[in-house]
Each structure stands twice: as structure tokens, then as C-alpha cells.
């Protein structure tokens, strides 16, 4: 299977999540997208939940530079060093792994290795991974610094693009969420509203 587009390398990893640094500024995969990285004898699958662009130098803030310029592109043309002083990183929640011919919707045996390449999954791989919605329990139970419900909805909207009948996939996902979030009707309703494309 095609590896997809290589966009970053793992710079921090735990059993439950990874942080990756993008090769190009502002070129992170979108919120909710499925990414993968190889490590050992398995591939780790993760859902992007946060993207951040920042200065590479700790304690040094980015300052405004475009007061006299007409476009944002002019800022980078006038200051080519910015591409080397800034970094775009993203964090992704681990939602499964592939080992041998098996695809598993639970955490892999070890974290992704540091410096392993991170690829954006192709649509056919997104479809294969989301045939089972068991990974939604990992997302629903996650404790993240941003709204988990926003990440769930973004992930399902993203995954629906891999299906010829995206609406049927979203209905199936909605039913799975109804079971997972049956004790929290307000939260369920909030996520379902965000599934609209």
C-alpha cells in the first residue's frame, strides 16, 4: 500500500500520542486527519488533534513584521530567515496500529520511534482503517487540551471523504457515538451537530 505523503518526523512520543515537526512551515495535516508512522514491526495510526506554529528559539516571541507590506508573502520574501526560525508542529492521538496483516483499533505495543517519518494516510487507507469504528472509544475517552468533541467530529468528516456515500458513513458513525455517549445526551447532540459538512 502507498505510504502517502511524508510531511513530518516524530519529535516526541508516548504510548497514547505523538508530536511531529513538519518539514515545511504551515504544512501540517488538517485537524482530524489520519496519519501514520512506522516503528519496529508495526505502523502506528493517529488522529491529528492540535497544530501549532511557533519560534524555534525558546523564550523568543514571534513579532509582527508586515506593517509596510501589502501581502503576507512579502514578509517572507523580505525575511527569508523566518522559514528557518519558525516551526509548525502537530500533535496526534494514537488510535490504532497495523502489525503483519492485522489492523488493530487499540494502542500499539510501544510508542512511535523518535525521528520516524509521519505520513498523511491516503483515502483508501482511511477507508480501510475506519471500516471499524472501534477507535472512536479512544477518541471519546481522551483528555486533551482542546475539545475532544471537535476532534471527533473533524475526524469523522475527514474520514467520510473516503466513502462514495459519505452520508451513510456519517450515519453509521452517529449510531456508534450514540452507543458510546449514551449517558451524556448533551455531548452526543453537540458532536452530531458538528458532523454536518
Image (tube, rainbow, N blue to C red):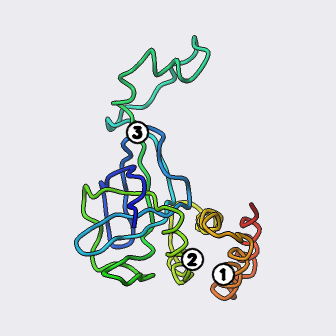
What residue is drawn where x is 45% and y is 14%? 78
What residue is drawn where x is 45% and y is 81%? 105
Which label was assigned to residue 185?
A: none
Which of the marked residues, 3 or 2, is nearer the chain's N terminus?
A: 3
For the N terminus, the image quarter is bottom left
Give the x, y percent position of residue 61: 42, 31
Per the image, the residue denoted by label 2 is 140
Give the x, y percent position of residue 101: 35, 82
Element under label 2? helix
**Is there CB contact under 8 Å for labels 2 and 1?**
yes
In depth, the one of 42 and 148 nearer the eye is: 42
**Is there CB contact under 8 Å for labels 1 and 3?**
no
Q: Is residue 53 above or below residue 95?
A: above
> In the figure, residue 38 lies in which quadrant?
bottom left
Which of the marked residues, 2 or 1, is nearer the chain's N terminus?
A: 2
Per the image, the residue denoted by label 1 is 177
Per the image, the residue denoted by label 3 is 24
Q: Is residue 53 left or right of residue 181?
A: left
Amino acid at each position: 500500500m502507498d505510504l502517502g505523503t511524508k510531511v513530518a518526523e516524530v519529535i516526541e512520543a508516548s504510548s497514547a500520542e505523538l508530536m511531529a515537526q513538519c518539514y515545511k512551515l504551515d504544512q501540517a495535516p488538517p485537524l482530524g486527519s489520519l496519519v501514520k508512522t512506522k516503528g519496529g514491526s508495526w505502523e502506528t495510526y493517529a488522529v491529528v488533534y492540535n497544530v501549532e506554529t511557533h519560534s524555534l528559539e525558546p523564550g523568543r516571541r514571534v513579532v509582527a513584521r508586515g506593517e509596510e507590506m501589502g501581502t503576507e508573502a512579502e514578509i517572507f520574501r523580505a525575511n527569508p530567515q523566518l522559514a528557518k526560525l519558525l516551526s509548525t508542529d502537530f500533535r496526534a492521538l494514537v488510535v490504532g496500529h497495523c502489525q503483519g496483516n492485522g489492523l488493530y483499533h487499540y494502542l500499539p505495543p510501544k510508542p512511535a520511534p523518535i525521528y520516524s517519518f509521519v505520513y498523511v494516510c491516503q483515502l483508501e487507507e482511511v477507508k480501510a482503517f475506519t471500516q471499524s469504528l472501534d477507535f472512536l472509544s479512544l477518541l471519546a475517552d481522551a483528555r486533551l487540551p482542546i475539545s475532544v468533541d471537535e476532534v471527533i467530529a473533524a475526524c469523522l468528516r475527514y474520514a467520510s471523504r473516503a466513502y462514495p456515500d459519505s452520508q451513510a458513513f456519517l450515519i453509521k458513525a452517529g449510531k456508534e457515538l450514540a452507543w458510546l455517549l449514551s449517558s451524556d445526551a448533551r455531548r452526543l447532540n453537540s458532536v452530531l451537530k458538528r458532523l454536518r459538512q
